[in-house]
């Protein structure tokens, strides 16, 4: 986990955790935002960059839909995925 801003972090989840950060392969990444963070809007910008970095063809409207789905699902402990493999 890397702190980006106060209450906003980038989390990389490995396929298989070995403890060796130089060889672990990232399975997926997400932006974590603490509910009390004053940087929630900035976190959305980071999330958009993260999606674009992994799916450059994504339209802005598609990213907005994905982020809205993620925001809704986060309240019940679920995540949104654009199904890029």
Image (cartoon, helix red, strand yellow):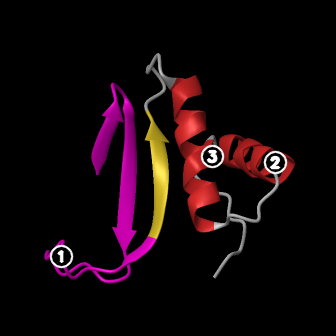
Q: Are marks 1 and 2 in contact (CB under 8 Å)?
A: no
Residue that numbered label 3 is attached to: 48
Identity of the residue drawn at 76% across and 65% down: 57
Mark 3–mark 1 distance (CA, rounded to whole Å):
26 Å
Quarter occupied by residue 7? top left
Residue at 33 percent across and 80 percent down: it is: 25
Range drawn in magenta: 1-27
Per the image, label 2 sits on a secondary structure element best described as: helix
Q: What is the x, y in percent for residue 47?
A: 57, 45
- Residue at image coords 59%, 66%: 54
Task: Specify the quadrant of the image occupied by residue 82.
Answer: bottom right
Element at badge 1?
A: loop
- Observer-side mark, 3 or 2, equals 3
Residue projecting furthest to the top: 38
In this picture, is 77 found above or below 14?
Answer: above
Up the image or down, 33 lies above or below 84; here it is above
Residue underneath mark 1: 22
Residue beneath disc 2? 65
* SS for callout 3: helix
Q: Is residue 76 above or below residue 83?
A: above
Is 21 magenta? The answer is yes
Neighbours of disc 3 within 10 Å: few (<14), some (14-19), many (20+): some
* Residue at the spot 46% in from the left edge and 61% down from the top edge: 29
Cα separation, mark 3 vs mark 2, equals: 11 Å
Q: Nearer the viewer, residue 83 or 46?
A: 46
Q: Residue furthest right?
A: 61
Disc 1/disc 2 C-alpha distance (Å)? 34 Å
């Amino acid at each position: 986990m890397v702190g980006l801003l106060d209450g906003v972090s980038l989390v990389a989840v490995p396929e298989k955790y070995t403890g060796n950060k130089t060889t672990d392969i990232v399975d997926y990444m997400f932006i974590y935002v603490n509910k009390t963070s004053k940087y929630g809007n900035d976190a959305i910008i980071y999330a958009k960059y993260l999606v674009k970095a992994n799916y450059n063809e994504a339209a802005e409207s598609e990213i907005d839909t994905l982020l809205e789905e993620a925001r809704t699902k986060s309240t019940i402990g679920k995540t949104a995925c654009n199904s890029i493999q």
